Image (tube, rainbow, N blue to C red):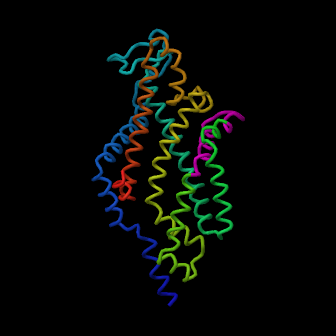
Amino acid sequence: MPANSKWVAEPAATNASPSLRIWWIGAFSRHRLARIGFAGLVLIAVLSLLGPILSDPDVQQVNLGRMDEAPSSVHPLGTDQLGRDLLWRVMEGGRVSLWIGLIATILATVIGCGYGMVSAMSKSWLDRIMMQILDAALAIPILLLVIVFQAFGDSGVFKLILTIGLVSWMGTARMMRNECRRLLHTTFIQSAITAGASPSRIALTHLLPNALGPLMVVVTVGIGQAILLETTLSFLNLGVPSTLPSWGNLLGNGMSAALGGVWWVVVFPGFAIVATVSCINLVGDGLRDIVNPKQREKD
């Protein structure tokens, strides 16, 4: 009955059907806090992407005649130390920070998924070695690793993305390994193995689609963590070059002015960071409750 076994495995592996997608959308839409977080995140993303394009070019220029102006009807968030409109700077900084967080998280997800699935499908001795390596990497503070990587060589956006991605994959790898180990004992994957499916087919066609739920939670939270890492490094002058506005650069460049009473140059970028990460965490909590409702009952 090999043919029948193979046929049985296929529907289970491709269960990402339209009805399942509709169920996911319905479950997410019923989670009030997740809806609020998603709406806030969409608003922040739209403002960050379109705001700088649609804004008046004059407000982007250095104007020493309007340095450190307080918020007003002309400049809703005030101006910075060089007379540039802070609203435009915050939106432009959001575009930089969001792109860095998103791309770095995608890189970390690819590495983590690959490592986790290979570990789960390996022989027990190799799995133990890979997990010991992972535990050792997790024992080192991420911020320390990033600072060490960024301290060598020239700084730049590409290097920052690469650095954040290379130090942020461990949590994804552990989750994927545990989830894949669980899935490997299910009936439909055992049927696929019996039918002679190759390891790559099992990983890409069976394991990955069925681990998408927990993976979405980890990826969502990872974006927020990547944004915080970028902000911290840019604040310490180890991240985005000072010629590019990012939320971290805005905070770092505005600290001296804030100590002199120009509070808006750090309050508004700081609020943008807190609001963005909070919205991401609300979406992540909503996805977690959908994937693992028992955890919500415990909380």
Going 40% across and 27% down the picture, which residue do you hit?
55
User: Residue extending furthest front?
Assistant: 298
| Magenta segment boundaries in residue numbering | 148-170
Residue 277 pos. (x, y %): 43, 39
Say if 285 sits above or below 267 in the image. Answer: below
Q: Which corner quadrant of the image does residue 161 belong to?
A: top right
Say if 262 sits above or below 157 in the image. Answer: above
Going 62% across and 64% down the picture, which residue do you hit?
119
Magenta stretch secondary structure, dominant: helix
Please tell me which residue lies in front, 100 or 166: 166
Residue 259 pos. (x, y %): 49, 14
Q: In screen coordinates, is 97 left or right of 136?
A: left
Q: Which corner quadrant of the image does residue 274 belong to?
A: top left
Going 61% across and 41% down the picture, which residue do you hit?
141
User: Residue extending furthest bottom?
Assistant: 1
**Is residue 161 in the magenta section?**
yes
Residue 10 pos. (x, y %): 46, 77
